[in-house]
Amino acid sequence: MGVLLRQSFEKLPDSLKHTIRNAAYRVFTDEGFSKASTNHIITIAGISKGGLFYHFQSKEDLYRYLIDYALAFIEKHYIGRLRHLERTDFITRYREVAAIKHEAMQKESHVFTFLATLHLKRPQEIPSEQSARMHSLMQESEDILTKDIDTSMLREDIQPGYLLKYMNYVMDGYKNDLQKHYRSHDFGEEDFQKDFEDYERFLQHMKKLFYK
Amino acid sequence: MGVLLRQSFEKLPDSLKHTIRNAAYRVFTDEGFSKASTNHIITIAGISKGGLFYHFQSKEDLYRYLIDYALAFIEKHYIGRLRHLERTDFITRYREVAAIKHEAMQKESHVFTFLATLHLKRPQEIPSEQSARMHSLMQESEDILTKDIDTSMLREDIQPGYLLKYMNYVMDGYKNDLQKHYRSHDFGEEDFQKDFEDYERFLQHMKKLFYK
DNA sequence: CCCACTTTCGACCAGAGTGGTCAGTTATCA
DNA sequence: TGATAACTGACCACTCTGGTCGAAAGTGGG
């Protein structure tokens, strides 16, 4: 038995697999492993109790599958693509990374939130083999913003290592504010133009602050 | 009845009230209102089931009390003190705010994490009267870093409003990195010297980047 | 059309855990 | 000492849990 069950799951149509995974990701993300309810998952996914346990032998088996899938997905559609980026300046790099992440999140946004909360969990809730793999991927995704960056146009009165850190802080802060804004404010079409202008001005500011 | 019960709670020794509140804060913060277990709370607090319900008429009554207490505490020991700050430059202001927050968190750190998670919750879990009060306090605490700031020494090629935002991003980023560092790394005595030097250098960098 | 096989369903189970009660014990202090 | 306040934990009815299983429905080859 065991893994054999998951083979039946793999045979499902992609859209159904997607639905079930997303339901499970949502519940596990919100409640954590132990408090997450399989009943809750199946109602969100719109399948039956028996259906779920036909494909997965237990709640834990499902959980492990989700971690595996998330890591594989991130590896393939996010981290893997980051490895091929060419040497460039920080702002361009940040923008490229954001674009790749955006693309990946279009496909499976729940994977990212799931891994993000998993990353903060006490280790008890994460099988140890997967934990190591996860942390190394997380590490790699952080390094991408400091490694192989062209620093030749940065101002020279502060060491480039610090400058990159500070730029990263500012861009993250800007990004977070933007997300907060989008979450609260239901945006109309005409806002895009304004947002785009904002962003252009922001990049000009960054150059004034950090470039020669 | 009702509020009368809370009077018996107020008569308890401060240390016991503190213990009970902290236990409850922890559980409600981790699990949210509906999934939080009173059994869990009493085991952490080290009191009996009957004891809890002698002082609070229900789980919801306890929850409302905690929100009230948190808001009153923040009002008195944090926001209230921020109102008396004198006009100064951003870096000094940020440092003053951090110091006041630090003092308040020494007294009741769980209050801050509780309110922070409460702030992100869907409104269903927050009684509406308290919700408004909470959001206005949160707003006020954000405003303190932009209002009545002396901007005369800022560089002049970027409008001060933007500069303040960017400085805020950088300082928050620095603070977060520091917290992450302290959480992972068990620090010895001699690290303090190094950390202090780091911080001084960081402030120099801030002045180079944002001041004239 | 049948048949063998895979997939799906949901009623059902024993057990755990829930918020809350209350008769009884202990602490307090006049 | 006695009256009252403070506290205890066994107990309650109830909900929800992860998981099972016999039956029904789908599927595709012959």
Image (cartoon, coloured by chain):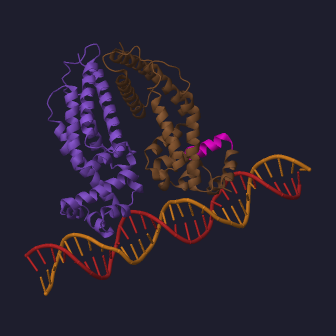
Chain colours: A brown, B purple, C red, D orange
Q: Dividing the picture into quarters, in which one does residue D13 lie?
A: bottom left
Quarter of the figure that contains the N terminus of chain B: bottom left
Q: Is residue B31 visible?
A: yes
Residue B102 part of the magenta-drawn span: no
Q: Position of residue C19 (x, y in %)?
A: 38, 63
Identify which residue is drawn at 51% across, 37% down.
Answer: A137
Q: Report whether A39 appears left or right of A201.
A: right
Q: Nearer the viewer, residue C28 or A191?
A: C28
Is the residue C1 above or below the residue A118 in the image? below
Identify which residue is drawn at 47% across, 51% down.
Answer: A32
Q: Dividing the picture into quarters, in which one does residue B132 lie?
A: top left
Q: Is residue B136 visible?
A: no
Q: Nearer the viewer, residue B34 or A18?
A: A18
Q: Position of residue A138 (x, y in %)?
A: 48, 37
Is the residue C22 above or below the residue B134 in the image? below
Quarter of the figure that contains the C terminus of chain B: top left
Which residue ends up furthest to the front in the rendered image?
Answer: B190
Is the residue B56 above or below the residue B149 in the image? below
Q: Which residues are magenta?
A: A12-23
- Looking at the rendered structure, the number of numbered marks drawn on it comes to 0
Identify which residue is drawn at 58% across, 32% down.
Answer: A77
Q: Position of residue A205 (x, y in %)?
A: 35, 17
Q: Position of residue A128 (x, y in %)?
A: 51, 49
Q: Report whether D1 appears left or right of B126.
A: left
Q: Nearer the viewer, residue B108 or B76?
A: B108
The majority secondary structure of the magenta stretch comes to: helix
